[in-house]
Amino acid sequence: MANETNGATMEEQIGSAAGQVWTYLAKKKTSVSLTDLPKLVDLKPQVAYMGLGWLAREGKLCYENKAGKFSVGLVPTECCL
């Protein structure tokens, strides 16, 4: 049995988080700090990072590492939708 919180299964929560993250990154059109992202999309860090994992698995994200600071954005094909 799946864990449920507020009537939604964990899979539903992660899918919803992935949608929120994708929407934010699509509007932003630039990469954002991984550590700032949960605050920017108003999600608990664990859920935001699980949503990122969902999007990464689908090949929708690109990551950057500049001087040890990671940022994430959408791959160019996602930005052009």
Image: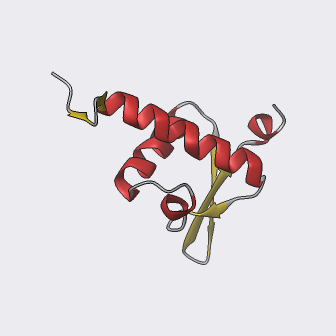
**Which residue sits furthest left?**
1
**Which residue sits furthest bottom?**
67
Between 74 and 5, the one nearer to me in the picture: 5
Q: Please tell me whether residue 5 is drawn above or below residue 33 in the rendered image.
A: above
| Residue 30 horizontal/vertical position (percent) | 76, 57
Between 2 and 75, the one nearer to me in the picture: 2
Q: Please tell me whether residue 7 is drawn above or below residue 48 in the rendered image.
A: above
User: Which image quadrant: the N terminus?
Assistant: top left
Q: Please tell me whether residue 1 is drawn above or below residue 72 in the rendered image.
A: above
Q: Residue at x 72, y 42 (%)?
A: 75
Q: Residue at x 78, y 52 (%)?
A: 29
Between 24 and 32, the one nearer to me in the picture: 24
Q: Residue at x 35, y 29 (%)?
A: 11
Picture quarter containing residue 6? top left
Q: Is residue 44 left or right of residue 59?
A: left
Picture quarter containing residue 79? top right
| Residue 62 horizontal/vertical position (percent) | 65, 48
| Residue 58 horizontal/vertical position (percent) | 56, 30
**Which residue sits furthest right?**
80
Q: Give the colour scheme of this rendering.
A: secondary structure
**Which residue sits furthest top?**
1
Count of number-bearing discs: 0
Q: Is residue 37 left or right of residue 49?
A: right
User: Which image quadrant: the C terminus?
Assistant: top right
| Residue 10 horizontal/vertical position (percent) | 30, 33
